[in-house]
Amino acid sequence: MDHQAVEHDVLVIGAGGAGLRAAIEAAAAGASVGLVCKSLLGKAHTVMAEGGVAAALANVDDRDDWRVHFADTMRGGQYVNNWRMAELHAREAPARVRELEAWGALFDRTPDGRILQRNFGGHRYPRLAHVGDRTGLEMIRTLQDHGVHQGMDVHMECTILTLLTDGGRVAGAFGYDRERGRFRLFRARAVVLATGGIGRAYRITSNSWEYTGDGHALAYDAGAELQDMEFVQFHPTGMVWPPSVRGILVTEGVRGEGGVLRNSEGRRFMFDDIPENYRAQTAASEEEGWRYTQGDRDARRPPELLTRDHVARCILREVREGRGSPHGGVYLDIAWIRERLPGAAEHIRRKLPSMYHQFKELAGIDITTTPMEVGPTTHYIMGGIRVDGDSQMSTLPGLFAAGECAAGLHGANRLGGNSLSDLLVFGKRAGEHAAAWAGAHPPAPIGPDQVEAAARRALEPFDRAGSGDAESPYRLQQELQGMMQDEVGIVRTEGQMRRALEGLAALRRRAARVAVEGHREYNPGWHAALDLANLFTVSEAVARSALEREESRGGHFRDDRPEKTAEGATFNVVVRRGADGGMEVIRRPVAPMPQELQEVIDANA
């Protein structure tokens, strides 16, 4: 098949925060770098991250340090985290934020000129460095501006279809450009996957169209292991009205600035259910919660700033028990602070400019006077490619992963803001170690049969055009999303997950008849057809992993097994391709934590 071939020492797939940071570091090490992005450069989903970057800078509260951040991350992840990644993340995040500042990021400031930090769910102290509620956009702008001077080739609007291997190591990748449909062959000594999440496997999601599980599926198909795929995070607050914007994120920063959750009766229901392990850190009254958001060091945080999994389930409970808002959510009220704060309207517009304009333009609501209707939305997956904590290399030699498509750091539940510092810390490490790997290993040969087979598979939907039993890729994706939302959503049971697996098998059989009309240029139907295989892979991995974990922990809640078990903290669920081509599920023991880190957790309980 005709294709364009290019060669790089390091190929980075994904141009969000993790991919850009990896490319910068690899290029700085002297490697020839290629950067592939599914969309246009600058439109990565990282720009939608609003609340801030979690790093123990201690600019607002000098009691904060890496030890407290480490303990918070492990507690939030319910101790199935990769403790080495959690340690490195907590130690290195401050340096990565200061580095970003040195490269030109314009953070909000304290009165004495230091980087301002805000409260966020699960964090003991104000820890999120932010730029209003547009932090991700500022991060991408800064990384791009810095990265263009490092010397790298950018391949925009290009989708990778398969990783190419030789002798048990990665050798490159094969894909196509989305505009013309021409095939691309990328030869590379090392590959970094930074493709983000799987949100488009669900009907209601805050994720952009690119999030179809590409990196997870590419790694799995190439022979790498996936881990913790049962842990899907449903952000408590997405827009619920109007229907055209259902699921769009409402940043946790609203609650960090004093926003409260109320049901249809006007009651702050989050006070009804506070987990025992957070009770000592949670405000006992509305007055104390307000003082916390205003910087009172002696006050405890409001219950709206508990971990996302808990808040999402509390919202779902209110809706199911008939105390929800008219459109199936609850009310997030920041307007109430007008009662206590002079100039509150201007304060809200200054602190939350994107939220103010988002609701004004999309829902016709002024959040300075009117509560928002919000509800849980599929937001993030803690699971991903199993990697080494120090180098970020997967179980396939030469293949690295960073950001949301890599597992380990967040355990069973990610704390807000840890995602952006994750991108910086482990994007840097992945790029550094990928460049070192590339320098130590010669290029691997790529057999023409691999390339031809990949091209043939990509073109099969055209061969079925006009067939009487042809299936629409859009219909299949819609049915998949509905099934995952209903059967493997916020609350799960064994019966639901088994129905999901049966449904997935049926959808896969129908997918063998997917057909598209026309030609390869400007053909979104073809793009949708090619995304289906990845969506099936990650959906099956989520369902099988969730079935294997017979307890509730973090983002994985089973209505038929609602309690945590002691055994559950001792293993990670891993999926890999079996010898027969089917998905194999195994349990891998959680690595024992060094005594000095256990003492850090005990000291910050």
Image (cartoon, rainbow, N blue to C red):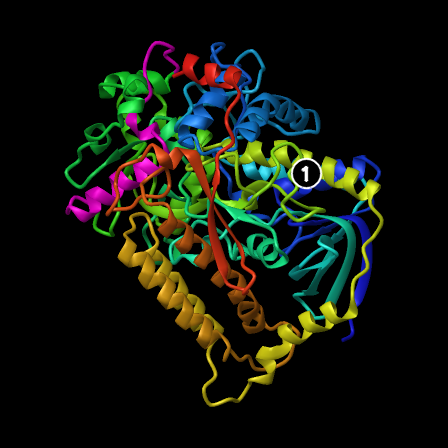
Q: Which quadrant of the rendered structure holds the N terminus?
A: bottom right
User: Does residue 360 show up?
Assistant: no
From the viewer's perspective, is 555 left or right of 215?
left
Residue depicted at 61% across the width and 57% down the height: 218
Residue 604 lies left or right of residue 428; in this view the side is left
Residue 570 place in picture, x, y as percent = 42, 34
- Identify which residue is drawn at 60% across, 41% down: 387
Q: Is residue 336 or residue 114 the one in the foreground?
A: 114
- The stretch in magenta equals 295-324
Disc 1 marks which residue? Answer: 430
Task: Relative to 545, say whether 517 is above or below.
Answer: below
> Which quadrant would the C terminus be assigned to in this image?
top left
Mark 1 residue element: helix
- Residue 234 horizontal/vertical position (percent): 38, 44
| Pick the front one: 541 or 250 | 541
- Is 178 situated above or below 65? below
Q: Is residue 129 a member of the stretch shown in magenta?
A: no
Q: Along the horizontal axis of the image, is 583 left or right of 44?
A: left
Count of marks placed on residues: 1
Given the image, on which type of amino acid does mark 1 rest? Answer: Ala
Query: Can residue 183 be seen in this snapshot?
Result: yes
Residue ranking furthest to the front: 579
Residue 342 position, x and y percent, is: 34, 20
**Quarter of the rendering containing residue 257:** top left
Q: Position of residue 286 (x, y in %)?
A: 23, 21
Residue 317 falls within the magenta-colored stretch:
yes
Dot 1, crowdedness within 10 Å: few (<14), some or many (≥20)? many
